[in-house]
Image (cartoon, helix red, strand yellow):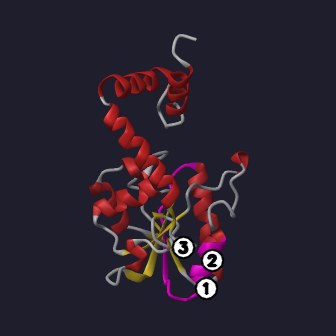
Amino acid sequence: MIFSPLLEQLIQSLTALPGVGPKSAQRMALHLLERDKAGALRIANNLVSAVENIQHCEQCRIFSEEPLCTICKSDIRDRSVMCVVEGPADLLAIEMSGSFRGLYFVLMGHLSPIDGIGPDEIGSDVLKRRLETGEVEELVLATGTTVEGEATAHFLAELAHHQNVKVTRIAHGVPMGGDLEYVDSNTLHLAFSSRRLLD
């Protein structure tokens, strides 16, 4: 062991972040300890505060400090249209495009039996209860174009059809195998403006 046990633990914990391998984690840890201890403490305090105080919105499942997020509480959103996305980054990408003014539902993943992710894990029971209220007239499926994303869209379409809710799918201006968080605003705008009915 080259470093002290505490430093080794810090480096190891940083590798939990996506895209951060041992070398990157080591570089981050050493930078924080050498050059920015105050910044390291801010990160630590903010992380503890976030973990302790952020939960899921009761309606859409996005991260929120309140029982309902700002989008679900908004009086200016179109409550008759709901967009289903796989994750918070997808919701943010759509919001940044300015092409959608309805409500959202965040799956926090997609169906993946191999990984043990089934309907319960993506909140299908919560979505079903939302659809049963009759408030939502159109469900826009904006899941990824991966095999899992398509399977998830098909499953959700069936769920919505049982509630007599119109189902649309965003157009495939989004590249195959791509994630919404990396798609530019113009492509997202085109995808939303040319969404189609799913049979």
Label 3 residue SS: loop
Label 1 residue SS: helix
Marks 2,3: beta carbons within 8 A: no
C-alpha span from label 2 to label 3: 13 Å
Marks 2,1: beta carbons within 8 A: yes
- In screen coordinates, is 6 left or right of 100? right
Viewer-closest of 197 and 68: 68
Viewer-closest of 95 and 183: 95
Q: Position of residue 117 (x, y in %)?
A: 68, 54
* Sequence order check, earlier mark of 2 and 3: 3
Q: Is residue 32 above or below residue 175?
A: above
C-alpha span from label 3 to label 1: 15 Å
The answer to whether residue 130 is magenta is yes
Q: Quadrant of residue 30?
A: top left
Check disc 2 and give the amino acid type.
Lys
The residue singled out by tag 2 in the image is 128
The residue singled out by tag 3 in the image is 58
C-alpha span from label 2 to label 1: 6 Å
Q: Position of residue 61 (x, y in %)?
A: 52, 66
Q: Residue at x 27, y 56 (%)?
A: 186
Q: Residue at x 36, y 43 (%)?
A: 42
The residue singled out by tag 1 in the image is 132
Residue at the extreme bottom of the image, as rendered: 134
- In magenta, the rendered stretch is 125-146
